[in-house]
Image (cartoon, helix red, strand yellow):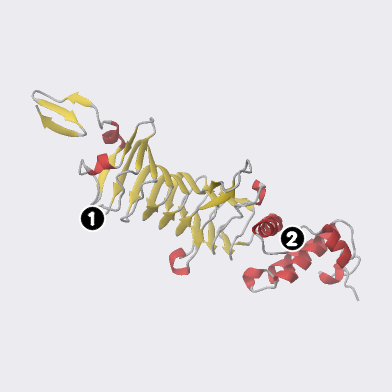
């Protein structure tokens, strides 16, 4: 016997919209994959809820499902991509519903989230403490299906991210408008696509930056790797590895690595510090340093001036004076931030 959509949600046929909504929320939480639930059951619950909202008491037959199918079978790259696009939309819609649940609000107003976020967007006016990783369906065409989180007033914090192997990856965008972002390892992704003009054997690379924005606060992470943007008043990071862009007023780098294709933009009145006490060999000479006023130069200019390593403060003013020549009393000329005798 075919179950009705009311049966699937454990409801009577005269259930109100409020009762339908409450039953859906409870079941989707109980059976969610992050709590060990079954993916097929979750799909069945979501479909029953959507059907009841549309006034359909019974789910589609197998033939009707086949006619409406958006998911393609097979193992080719194109078919896998189609399946992923459909899945990203389904998960994003589930996230939209979840906004009303408020996950688990603590007595102090902070929001507690458990489990991995796969897709979708939400905003919260308070601190978010999360036990889990974040990823994003970077391949999705619709922006609303990608993972974006906005904290209006408060911090975004991953709980013990290194110990628990929590990561932020694949184009996630997190903004703390008036607070800090404290997480673990952060990574983006590059996608190789066939030439859009259809030329055989030619491919293009599309970059999907994972972005962290804290314009009025701190960004504290372990390693930024493979296409990442860090934009904050203060950025504290271990290593900058492969195509990482940093925009900050205050920057502290505690690790030993910064690759040649990394860029740092220092904001006016700011400073940066590299704490490497070794040879600084892995801090690439060709990494780009930019100032807010547009001045650009290579990292080697700081190395040759002995301003890198052991916690030396490099100020915006010092960098802005590189290459300038100013008189500094009789017999001296100021260049590259040092007094030199004529």
Name the residue tied to disc 2.
72
Residue 281 placement (x, y as % from top left) = 26, 52
In the rendered structure, the answer to whether residue 319 lies left or right of residue 7 reads: left
Name the residue tied to disc 1.
277
Observer able to see residue 17: no
- The answer to whether 148 is drawn above or below residue 336 in the figure is below
Q: How many marks?
A: 2
Along the line of sight, which residue is nearer the eye, 32 or 105? 32
Q: Residue at x 63, y 72 (%)?
A: 35
> Quick one: quadrant of the N terminus?
bottom right
Q: Residue at x 89, y 60 (%)?
A: 56
Q: Earlier in the sequence, mark 1 or mark 2?
A: 2
Residue 269 placement (x, y as % from top left) = 34, 35
Residue 302 placement (x, y as % from top left) = 25, 41
Quick one: which residue is furthest to the bottom in this view?
A: 1
Q: Residue at x 11, y 27 (%)?
A: 332
**CB of mark 1 within 8 Å of CB of mark 2?**
no
* Discs 1/2, front: 2
Q: Quadrant of residue 54?
A: bottom right
Q: Residue at x 24, y 27 (%)?
A: 324
Q: At numbered mark 2, what does the secondary structure look like: helix, strand or loop?
A: loop
Q: At numbered mark 1, what does the secondary structure look like: helix, strand or loop?
A: loop
Q: How dense is the environment of label 1, judged by Cα within 10 Å: few (below 14), some, or many (20 and up)?
A: few
Q: What is the number of the mark on residue 117? A: none
> Quick one: quadrant of the C terminus?
top left
Observer able to see residue 300: yes
């Amino acid at each position: 016997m075919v179950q009705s959509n009311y049966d699937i949600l454990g409801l009577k046929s005269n259930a109100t919209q409020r009762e339908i909504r409450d039953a859906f929320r409870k079941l989707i939480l109980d059976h969610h994959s992050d709590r060990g639930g079954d993916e097929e059951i979750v799909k069945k619950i979501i479909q029953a809820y959507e059907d009841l909202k549309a006034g359909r008491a019974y789910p589609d037959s197998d033939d009707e499902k086949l006619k409406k199918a958006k998911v393609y079978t097979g193992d080719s790259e194109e078919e896998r991509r189609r399946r992923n696009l459909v899945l990203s939309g389904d998960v994003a819609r589930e996230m939209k519903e979840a906004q009303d649940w408020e996950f688990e609000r603590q007595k102090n107003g902070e929001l507690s989230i458990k489990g991995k976020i796969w897709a979708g967007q939400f905003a919260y006016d308070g601190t978010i403490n999360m036990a889990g990783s974040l990823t994003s369906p970077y391949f999705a065409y619709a922006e609303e299906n990608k993972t974006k989180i906005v904290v209006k007033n408060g911090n975004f914090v991953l709980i013990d991210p290194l110990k628990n192997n929590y990561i932020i990856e694949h184009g996630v965008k997190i903004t703390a408008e008036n607070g800090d972002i404290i997480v673990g390892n952060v990574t983006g992704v590059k996608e190789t696509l066939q030439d859009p003009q259809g030329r055989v054997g030619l491919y293009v690379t599309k970059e999907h930056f994972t972005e962290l924005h804290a314009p009025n606060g701190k960004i504290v992470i372990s390693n930024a790797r493979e296409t990442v943007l860090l934009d904050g008043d203060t950025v504290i990071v271990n290593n900058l590895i492969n195509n990482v862009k940093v925009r900050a007023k205050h920057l502290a780098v505690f690790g030993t690595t910064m690759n040649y294709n990394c860029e740092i933009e220092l904001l006016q009145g700011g400073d940066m510090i590299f704490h490497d006490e070794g040879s600084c060999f892995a801090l690439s000479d060709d990494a780009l340093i930019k100032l807010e006023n547009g001045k650009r130069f290579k990292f080697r200019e700081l190395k040759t001036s002995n301003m890198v390593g052991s916690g030396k403060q490099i100020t915006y003013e010092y960098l802005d004076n590189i290459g300038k020549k100013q008189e500094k009393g009789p017999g001296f000329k100021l260049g590259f931030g040092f007094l030199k005798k004529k």
